[in-house]
Image (spheres, rainbow, N blue to C red):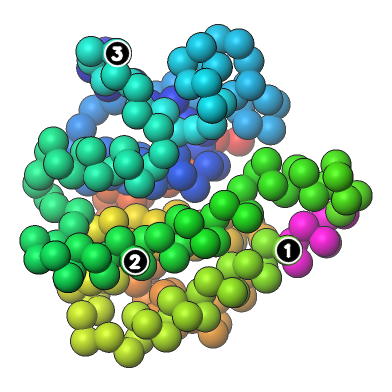
Amino acid sequence: MSDIVLHNYYRSSTSYRVRIALEMKGLSYDYVPHHLRHGEHLEPAYLAVNPQGLVPALILDDGTLLTQSLAIIEFLDETTPEPPLLPKDAAGRARVRMLAQMIACDIHPVNNLRVLTSLRTLFSAGDQDITNWFRHWVNEGFQPLEKILAASAETGAFCHGDMPGLADICLAAQVTSNARFGVDMTPYPTIARINAACMALPAFQRAAPQNQIDAE
């Protein structure tokens, strides 16, 4: 048994982000799955843990509840400094947070499961409508992200230099989600290159959706 409990779902990109960070930090944790498509995250037992009813949720050994993947990852980075997920300099940290938030705050929120479900229930969207919606918002975010990464001297093997960090965690999780919706990555060679570098790393592989106990 570990002192850390992670409530998550194998296919959730936000859960994937936190799993990557835990693996990169070498932290063991107890894996508690909640099947989002079956509504398990809305059951009273889980709402008693996380009233927001979302994943991921990290429970520390003293019972402290942490939610929201970016907040969790920065907590892990502050409490387990090696390897660092953010640069030491203020400008570098701001750049990495900017890149991460372009994905986590601009792309993901409009493409998460509850939004896609609402499109079906409120507006009678069909499967192709959902796919078109998902691809549209990914492209809206990836077009500027590709330009920034391709043009910046600070981009290295990864989003910022030659070590993976917070921005790469968000990028890899999003690209994995994109594959389910058939997003064409041809216009994004820099993003695709960085993703390939991430997916060659054991931490990203161990955290991948298909390698989780609840994978289907």
**Residues at marks 3 and 1 touching, judged by CB atoms closer than 8 Å:** no
Q: What's the amino acid at mark 2?
A: Met
> In the rendered image, which quarter contains the C terminus?
top right
Q: Quadrant of the N terminus?
A: top left
Residue 210, above or below 175? above
Report the Cα–Cα distance between label 2 and label 1. 24 Å
**Stretch in magenta:** 126-132
Q: Residue at x 52, y 62 (%)?
A: 106
What is the chief secondary structure element of the magenta stretch?
A: helix
Q: Is residue 12 left or right of residue 65?
A: right
Residue holding disc 3: 63
Kindly indicate the quadrant of the structure image that contains residue 156. bottom left
Measured from the top left, where is residue 190 in percent x and y?
Answer: 39, 81
Amino acid at dot 1: Trp
Q: CA distance from mark 3 to mark 1?
A: 39 Å
Callout 1: SS = helix
Q: Vertically, is 79 above or below 90?
A: above
The verdict on residue 40 being magenta is no
Q: Is residue 213 visible?
A: no
> At 49% from the left edge and 47% from the top edge, which residue is drawn?
13
Q: Position of residue 93 (x, y in %)?
A: 20, 63
Seen at 35% across and 29% down, the residue is 66
Mark 2 — residue? 98
Crowd band around label 1 with a 10 angstrom C-alpha radius: few (<14), some (14–19), many (20+): some
Coordinates of residue 183 in the picture (x, y in percent): 62, 69
Q: Earlier in the sequence, mark 3 or mark 1?
A: 3
Callout 3 amino acid = Gly
The circle drawn on residue 133 is 1
Q: Relative to the observer, which residue lies in front, 203 or 42?
A: 42
Alpha carbons under labels 2 and 3: distance apart: 31 Å
Q: Mark 2 vs mark 1: give the one in front.
A: 2
